[in-house]
Amino acid sequence: MLDRSAIKRDWFSNIRADILAGIVVALALIPEAIGFSIIAGVDPRVGLYASVAIAMVIAFTGGRPGMISAATAAVAVVVVPLVRDHGVEYLFAATILMGIFQGIAALLRLDLLMQFVSRSVITGFVNALAILIFMAQLPQLDPTAAGIGWMTYAMVIAALAMIYIIPKFTTAIPSPLIAIIVLTALTIWLDAPVNTVSDMGELPEGLPYFALPDVPLTWETLVIIAPYAATMAAVGLLESLLTAQIVDDMTHTGSNKRRESAGQGLANVVAAMFGGMGGCAMIGQSVINVTSGGRGRLSTFTAGLSLLILLAVLGDLVGRVPMPALVAIMIMVSIGTFSWNSIPNISKHPWQSSVVMLATVVVVVATHNLALGVLAGVILSGVFFTHKVMTMFEVVREREGDTAIYRAKGQIFYASVERFEAALGPESTMPDPADHVIIDVRKAHFWDISAVGALDKVVERMRRNGRSVQVRGLNRASSDLVDKFALTDKTGVEIGLAPHP
């Protein structure tokens, strides 16, 4: 059953701002899509058609209103060997399989893995992406390159001035759109010697058409495309879900990550069937959309539809848009994306958090691979967390008459079992060995079979040395583990582990 209130909120609550923001995004998508096509080694229309299809489909199927998805560099770099060795038709086939994998990921709720990505990793991801966005503009500012002179720098400065100053007077029209219009008109009027969109690559003519990939439906084809499709699906989902979280934070709203995963899969399948490459959410364009006032699904759909109209109807005019205007917009995006307060927080936050953030930035910038950076950050976060929990553990021995009481406190799991075993005896080596031993675990928790195995080992060792042993204070969850996995005494009668009711 359709939720009319949700439809109204996502599509028609912000019509004017969504449409204008979508137009700005469409213009900013063109050089990006062309550039990503060049990276992948395919015709520019493959990236442009992908951006059209993905943006229009994800507007309906995605779980994060206002987020922009299109052809991306993260996916493009993965498919370079595939295109080089087997051709573009295999790229289309791999993109369809990529979408299927993403649909399966949604069914398996793999989006929940995002819970293991810490805030430090997200901050590092954002900062690294901001740096990469800025670095991607440097070739358009290289004074030794063709078409770049003093007018290029003047236009970039003028565009940045318009982008930041105009909103102080009016927000009726997004300032990036005004900058594009003004500088395009100026370039045409003056016949300015600056690089334009058409210099990035030939714009396609006409509309995309439906066609299935021209590849043999054999096991050999599957073997060729499956590794690429799996990598594309993982990278695409990772970037999409991280971008969704960032847009959530920017707009102070929530999103449906499972629906976003499924929506990305369907969008990629459709893109491949219309001659497009794979893609995912784009943080740069999403930031442009949000900062231009876009909030709903209409802004995403408008971006795709506007891009289609620009390519099919206004291709000649679009080709004359000056690159300095688009460079200025992307510089604005990089400035707005970077988490500037993370710099002073390096000295304020725990050093482990700062190391995770910086490591994520360094790996992403060094490899230009967002997935590797996030993976490095997640692994470091896990290592630091495990070490922290492992050290939150202590055992105190007390002597009461002929009984030694070991009071354990903290978390007992695979990383702390060695310290647990070392702290509990052997009782015979103590300066005042007792004949009776009580292991008090009321303030401890046993998390896994490694912890149960350690308890088994301690009890067995003490018994072997002639001590009577009683374990007391197991909470319900720990008792469940002991009842199920303990080897020394499952019933607990001899060592005081009476099964809980």
Image (cartoon, helix red, strand yellow):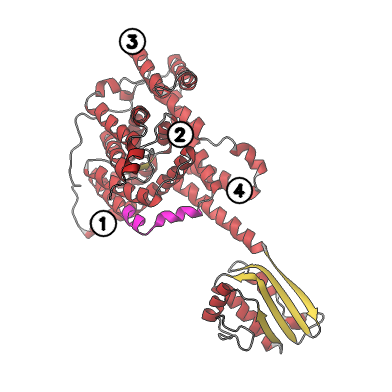
**Toward which corner of the image does residue 298 lie, by quadrant?**
top left
Magenta stretch in the rendered image? 101-116
Residue for point 28% across, 50% down: 1
Give the mark, 2 or 3, whose residue is nearer the N terminus: 2
Q: Amino acid at mark 2?
A: Ile
Is 298 or 138 nearer to us in this picture? 298
Reading the image, the residue beneath label 3 is 189
Label ID, residue 75: none
Magenta-span inclusion, residue 186: no
Name the residue at the front extreme.
5
Q: Categorize mark 1 by other alpha carbons within 10 Å: few (<14), some (14-19), many (20+).
A: some
Give the mark, 4 or 2, whose residue is nearer the N terminus: 2
Q: From this viewpoint, is residue 85 visible?
A: no
Q: From this viewpoint, is residue 92 visible?
A: yes
Q: Position of residue 166 (x, y in %)?
A: 46, 19
Q: Position of residue 284 (x, y in %)?
A: 43, 35
Question: What secondary structure do most residues of the magenta stretch adopt?
Answer: helix
Disc 4 to disc 2, how far (Cα)? Answer: 24 Å
Reading the image, the residue beneath label 4 is 353
Disc 4 to disc 1, how far (Cα)? Answer: 42 Å
